[in-house]
Image: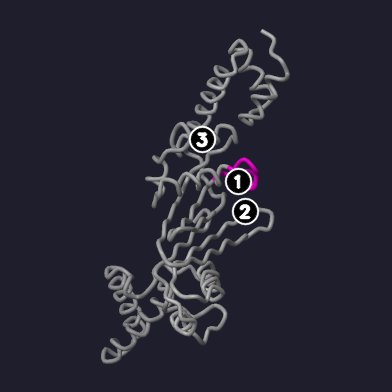
Amino acid sequence: MAVSLEDIKKLREQLGTGMVDTKNALEEAGGDVEKATEILRLKGAKGNAKRADRSTSEGLVIAHEGDGVAYLMELACETDFVAKNDKFVKLADDVLAAVVAAGSDNAEAALAAPAGSGTIATMIDDQAAIIGEKVELRRVAKLSGENFAVYLHKTNKDLPPQVGVVVAYSGSDADTARSVAQHISFADPQYLSREDVPEEAVEAERRIVEEISRGEGKPDAALPKIVEGRLGAFFKQVALLEQDYARDNKLQIKQVLEQAGLSVSGFARFRVGS
């Protein structure tokens, strides 16, 4: 049956589907918009299944803060073309809003959380069918705190933020807190303090540096001091408070925080695709 251009336009605006697909679905549905919508969604779902094994190395990071909690989220896609698409950016906003409403603190819980008439997972699948790429909610972090510093960094001026950091802190020096968030985006610490580094990771590093030191012919009597020194370098790499401040490498982050009257209780850092 013939369908009107008005119906085609209305359905396209609602779903974002192509002209030919929309026209064919309406004709197959006999002009029934609800049935045509179902046809298009089923077609998109089949496309999602075919894309399941594709890699998602592009996307964006997005953050939200308020009422003593903050969220950081990574939404991934296949290409940078989609990453900067308005529909993808809007999807990220909608997903984050649903994550916040549900109070989800990880991606698995978030995917099962309610969104519209379904879940966040179905919201993403429906939009992936329209966008035409695999889209996945890769990571979600939730922090509690008195104050938050949020830093979102664009590695490409034409794309949405690719690196995101949220720092939970107490104190009043917001400028320094933001500077520390910027430092985290660059330095990529894995833990807050050396005490937070798992003991098995420390022992593994200890064995490695001891073996390296022995291989260099260091005397046995000097080994303990040499090993501890090299462990200190390891802690500087992985623990935020031990790191040299990016803006002034004569200061460690813990000194910067102390001078500013700040105390960091936690942080999260996401980089798209890593």
Residue extending farthest front: 67
Label 1 and label 2: CA atoms lie apart by 8 Å
Q: Is residue 116 above or below residue 30?
A: below
Q: Which of the 4 quarters of the picture holds residue 234?
A: bottom left
Q: Upstream in the sequence, badge 1 or badge 2?
A: 1
Q: Local crowd at mark 3 within 10 Å, few (<14), some, or many (≥20)? A: some
Towards the viewer: 216 or 14: 14
Q: Nearer the viewer, mark 2 or mark 3?
A: 2
Q: Upstream in the sequence, badge 2 or badge 3?
A: 3
> Magenta stretch?
77-90
Q: Is residue 188 magenta?
A: no
**In terms of secondary structure, what is the magenta stretch mainly?**
helix
Label 3 and label 1: CA atoms lie apart by 20 Å
Q: What residue did someone put label 1 on?
A: 89
Q: Secondary structure at mark 1?
A: helix
Give the residue type at disc 3: Arg
Residue 191 is situated, as x and y percent measured from the top left of the image, at 39, 69
Residue pictured at 55% horizontal, 32% vertical: 129
Residue extending farthest right: 5
Q: What residue did someone put label 2 on?
A: 160
Q: Is residue 87 magenta?
A: yes
Q: Secondary structure at mark 3?
A: loop
Residue 182 is situated, as x and y percent measured from the top left of the image, at 55, 70
Residue pictured at 34% horizontal, 78% vertical: 209
Q: What residue did someone put label 3 on?
A: 51
Residue 50 is situated, as x and y percent measured from the top left of the image, at 50, 31
Residue contact at pointers 1 and 2, CB within 8 angstroms: yes
